[in-house]
Image (spheres, rainbow, N blue to C red):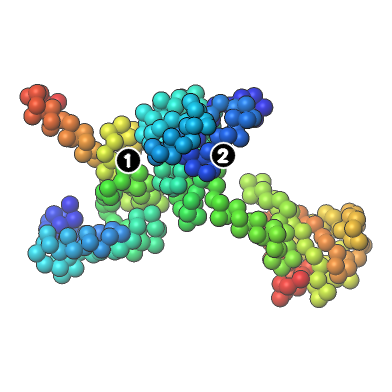
């Protein structure tokens, strides 16, 4: 997501607690993430200081896509309610919670739901 | 708390397990939810059907525990995100009237406030307040704090060098919103009048609006702040 958004000419800032994900970005790009114009902050998403350092205050879009649903749901709500980011999207694997939080006004993407639909189509030939 | 409540406790660690035991002894109905299988099996030996295995952030686990009829949901897992979200769905999805959340990292307290999860209890904060009680800085003890009602009662020991020492209550430059309600001297207390002279070594009880503590400390303890 980060590399494709950067490739489309947007300003992209990545916040991750693991420096290894920075390396992964470099490998994906074939050059340095910073040289390509990207920003990278090491820190955890629940730290307000880290979010600010990563530029949450200037962000038009905030995407919460750590590998934990709970972290994503909390940090997305912080971005929404504390920093008033206009478009906030959270990755939520649990379909029921993804649906409920979407009803509450938080945009969620549920990879599980997408996989279920694709599997149904592949296995049963049904278009959901 | 007289009649039996139905309480769901998320997390059967030291806090959750002991809380469950206490509430059961008081005659309440309790379901504890624990996501660690081994921990669950240990706790289950004692609590039996009052503990269930599962991740309390999953809606079906909460529903299996009967969250729809819970009077109180207490989230005391070791994970602040979990505690926050468990309380959020309890309150907003299942309309549970009373929730209590544990805050493990006091720096996360602001997130609980932001999302309206109250009360949020931080052990670190509680201990800090206890320390303030036991080891009063500036000879000051908080007897009562009611932030909602905007009311505080503090106790101060009047120091030798305090501006107030040797002066009548009426002559002490107390700010608006503060009132001396009691003076403790030589082991007994009395309600002072305007002409009561405050002596060094007196303990005074002051009722005040929050935020003006410093002005009062300056009068009774002195600017250097040491009793």
Give A115 or B27, whichever is nearer the viewer: B27
Q: Are marks 2 and 1 in contact (CB under 8 Å)?
A: no
Instruction: Classify mark 2: residues with Cα within 10 Å, few (<14), some (14-19) or many (20+).
Output: few
Q: CA distance from mark 2 to mark 1?
A: 36 Å
Q: Could you tell me which chain the residue with mark 2 belongs to?
A: B
In the image, is B181 to the left or to the right of A127?
right
| Up/down of A112 relative to B184, above or below | above
| Up/down of A69 relative to A54, above or below | above
Q: Are marks 2 and 1 on the same chain?
A: no
Please give the residue where the numbered disc 1 appears in the rendered image.
Answer: A106
Please give the residue where the numbered disc 2 appears in the rendered image.
Answer: B18
Q: Is residue A26 visible?
A: yes
Residue for point 90% across, 58% down: B187
Instruction: Classify mark 1: residues with Cα within 10 Å, few (<14), some (14-19) or many (20+).
Output: some
Quadrant of image for the C terminus of chain A: top left
Q: Residue B35: horizontal and vertical position, in percent? A: 39, 38
Choose top left, top right, bottom left or bottom right for residue B125. bottom right
Choose top left, top right, bottom left or bottom right for residue A121. top left
Q: Nearer the viewer, mark 2 or mark 1?
A: 2
Q: Residue A38: horizontal and vertical position, in percent? A: 20, 64
Q: What element does badge 2 sit on?
A: helix
Choose top left, top right, bottom left or bottom right for residue B163. bottom right
In the image, is A43 to the left or to the right of B123?
left
Residue for point 27% across, 54% down: A60
């Amino acid at each position: 997501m980060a590399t494709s958004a950067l490739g489309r000419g947007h300003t992209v800032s990545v916040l991750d607690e693991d420096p290894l994900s920075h390396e992964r970005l470099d490998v994906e790009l074939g050059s340095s993430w910073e040289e390509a114009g990207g920003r990278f902050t090491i820190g955890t998403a629940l730290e307000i200081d880290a979010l600010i350092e990563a530029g949450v205050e200037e962000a038009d879009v905030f995407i919460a896509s750590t590998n934990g649903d709970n972290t994503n749901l909390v940090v997305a709500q912080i971005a929404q309610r504390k920093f008033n980011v206009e478009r906030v999207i959270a990755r939520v694997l649990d379909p029921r919670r993804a649906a409920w939080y979407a009803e509450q006004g938080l945009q969620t993407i549920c990879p599980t739901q997408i996989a279920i639909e694709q599997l149904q189509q592949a296995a049963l030939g049904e278009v959901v | 708390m007289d009649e039996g409540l139905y309480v769901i406790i998320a997390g059967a660690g030291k806090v959750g397990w002991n809380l469950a035991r206490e509430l059961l002894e008081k005659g309440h109905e309790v379901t504890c939810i624990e996501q660690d299988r081994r921990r669950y099996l240990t706790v289950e030996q004692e609590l039996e059907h009052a503990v269930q295995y599962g991740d309390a952030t999953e809606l079906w686990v909460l529903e299996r525990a009967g969250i729809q009829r819970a009077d109180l949901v207490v989230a005391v897992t070791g994970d602040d995100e979990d505690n926050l979200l468990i309380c959020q769905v309890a309150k907003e999805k299942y309309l549970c009237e009373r929730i209590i959340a544990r805050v493990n990292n006091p720096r996360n307290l602001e997130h609980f406030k932001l999302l309206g999860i109250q009360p949020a209890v931080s052990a670190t904060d509680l201990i800090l307040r206890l320390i303030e009680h036991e080891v009063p800085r500036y000879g000051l003890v908080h007897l009562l704090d009611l932030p909602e009602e905007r009311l505080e009662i503090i106790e101060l020991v009047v120091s030798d060098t305090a501006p107030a020492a040797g002066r009548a209550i009426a002559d002490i430059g107390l700010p608006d919103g503060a009132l001396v309600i009691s003076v403790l001297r030589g082991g007994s207390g009395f309600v002072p009048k305007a002409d009561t002279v405050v002596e060094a070594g007196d303990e005074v009880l002051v009722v005040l609006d929050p935020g003006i503590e410093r002005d009062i400390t300056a009068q009774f303890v002195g600017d250097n702040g040491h009793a």
